[in-house]
Structures are given as structure tokens and as C-alpha cells.
Image (tube, rainbow, N blue to C red):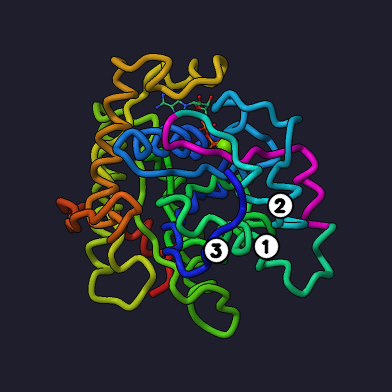
Amino acid sequence: MNDSVPSSLSKPRCIALMNQKGGVGKTTTTINLAAAIAQAGYRTLVIDLDPQAHATLGLGIDGAEGRSIYDLIHDATDAVASAREVSPNLLAIASHTDLAATETELAAAEDRLERMKRVIAAFAGRVDYVLIDCPPSLGLLTLNALAAADEVLIPMQAHFLALQGVGKLLETVKLLASGPQAINPRLKVAGVVLCMHDAASTHTREVVADLDAFFEGGRASESPWTGAVVFRPAIRRNIKLAESPSFGKTIFDYAPLASGAEDYRALAEAFLAGRRPQTTPQGEVPLVVTRPSISNAEKTEAAQASTPA
Ligand SMILES: Nc1ncnc2c1ncn2[C@@H]1O[C@H](COP(=O)(O)OP(=O)(O)OP(=O)(O)O)[C@@H](O)[C@H]1O
Ligand SMILES: [Mg+2]
């Protein structure tokens, strides 16, 4: 790909996958949801914004070769040429361990929160979706992703303590989207993706009911999560999803018949509903809207206690 982009072309829809809690399924969801969206026919870009470079590994890219997101954060020139083709419709920008130094390197830069915006702007008219795999922290890298994103998608495991973390995360998104420190007023929370899900556990079911009730209760509010949902289906625990990164393959290339592939394909369907770009270079795309099914439970206090009124 070359970099000569007519600036009038439509910007890609940008989704930051974030949760400051570690090991919850962010990277697994980023690469497999992106692969499923690409298979549905949309040009999709994964940006690995985590110095751990797990998405880079999982997509089978050599992070040592070519320009990484570290380079592009410092200078977005050639951003498009730096994207590697993973499979049809699926591109990726690799991470690099140097990324860990970005926080310090950019501390004094006035435009330090604008860097990802510039990288993504370069893909106007080139891709339909950008999925950013964020590190498990709320530092400068994640803030850069949130400054550039249209939506936040929260992968989580349905455990009681995880609810507290999601509450804090929502609070952070609200601060970034409104108020004196707002850096991205258009930022919305798309919802939660349930990862490594065990539907047989009573505790899990209670936590999911709490989440459903919480989002349903926020429908009338002006918060960034007004339209948020707990996406269905949940992603079941599936060992093939854990094995596939070691082969540098998405679940669709590694084990296309596994439950992990089935779940991520269905998740992509649910996610795309209501979010399809209005136009693509190939032509027009229909627009559909979904709403979640909602249940109730008494433990909503846990979620509500940790989220802003
Ligand atoms: N549905 C699943 N079934 C089985 N294993 C899974 C599933 N989802 C993720 N895993 C495994 O769980 C571990 C953590 O997942 P992942 O790396 O996606 O989390 P993460 O939130 O990106 O972690 P980090 O915070 O370190 O970036 C990985 O070993 C991954 O392969
Ligand atoms: Mg990760």
C-alpha cells in the first residue's frame, strides 16, 4: 500500500479494546474479532499498542521487521506503508518492546495525546475498522487510543471483582468524554465482551445479570455507555484460543471448527449490527441496530457503587 490518501475519504471506525485488568482476553478478542470482521468483508486494521506485543505474535508478524507503532507514534509518515497484510482484508501494525519507553519520551510533548489520531487518520478510505489492542494499564498509550477511538470495547471475565474494575474504567471514559479534561467528546462505550466464559457457574450468571441491569439502568442517562450492551454470545473457554497464538494464527486459520471460532464469528455479527460503515469503496452497506436482552439481579449495587451516578 502507498500513502497517497485523498483526505476527503471516510475515516475508519476505531475501536479501542481496553481493560486495565490483565489477562482478561483483550488480545484474544482483538485479533479474532478483527479476523472475523475481515472475513465478513470489511477491511480491518489491528494496531498492537501493547509493549508485550502479544497481538503481533498472535497474528504471526515479525515485530522486529519494518516500522512498528512505536515508530509511527513518533512520526506517522508512511503509516499506511507500515501496515502488514495478515490475510485478505486484515492488516496489522506491529508493536515493539520500545513502546514501553513512549510514556517517558512523550511526557513533555504538547501533542502527546494526538499521536494515535494521526496514525489512524492516515487510513481514511483505506480500511473500514481499526481495532486497537491496549495494554493492561491506563497510561499514556491507552489514553492515546481513547483520544483516537470512536468506541471502547471492554473484554472481561465475569467475576465479582472484575465488576469493580469495569466501574473504574467507565468512570475514566466519562472523564475523557466530558468535563474539563475531556479529550474525546465523541467517545462511547460499545459494551462488554465476556471472555473465557463459564455459563454453568451461578456466580458468573449473577455477574452477567448485574452487568445487564447496570447498562439497562443507564439507558436514560447522558453517559458514554448509554448504548452499551453485554455482547452475546459470550466467548466460551476454549483451549484452541490459547494455542493458536503460538502458531501465529487466528482461530479461523488454526481451528476453524472450534467453539472459539464459532463464538468470535457470532460476536462479530452482533458487533457489526448497527455499526456497518454507511459506505465502503465497494458500495453501500445496510444499517441495522441491536439492543441487548436484559435480566435483573440484586447485586447491581456492586457495579453501581463503583460507577459514577
Ligand atoms: N476463551 C478463551 N479460552 C481459553 N483461553 C483463553 C480464552 N481467551 C483468552 N485465553 C487465554 O488467556 C490468556 C489471556 O488472554 P489475553 O492475552 O487475550 O488477555 P489480555 O487481556 O490481552 O492480557 P494482557 O492484559 O496481558 O494484555 C492467554 O493465554 C489467552 O490465550
Ligand atoms: Mg493483551
Q: Is residue 58 above or below residue 246?
A: below
- Percent of width and height locating residue 254: 42, 15
Q: Is residue 209 above or below residue 143?
A: above
> Image point 35% across, 40% down: which residue?
37
Task: Kindly report the distance in space between the C-alpha atoms of the residues bearing marks 3 and 2.
Answer: 14 Å
- Label 1 C-beta lies within 8 Å of the nearest ligand 2 atom: no
* Residue marked by disc 3: 148
- Percent of width and height locating residue 83: 60, 41
Q: Amino acid at mark 1?
A: Arg
**Residue closer to the observer: 153 or 171:** 153
Farthest-out residue, bottom: 180
* Residue marked by disc 1: 115
Task: Kindly report the distance in space between the C-alpha atoms of the residues bearing marks 1 and 2.
Answer: 8 Å
- Percent of width and height locating residue 5: 55, 59
Please give the label number shown on residue 220: none
Look at the image and tell me whether residue 7 can be seen: yes
Q: Determine if the magenta segment contains residue 144.
A: no
Q: Determine if the magenta segment contains residue 91.
A: yes
* Residue marked by disc 2: 72
Q: Amino acid at mark 3?
A: Ala
Look at the image and tell me whether residue 165 can be seen: no
**Residue closer to the observer: 138 or 301:** 138
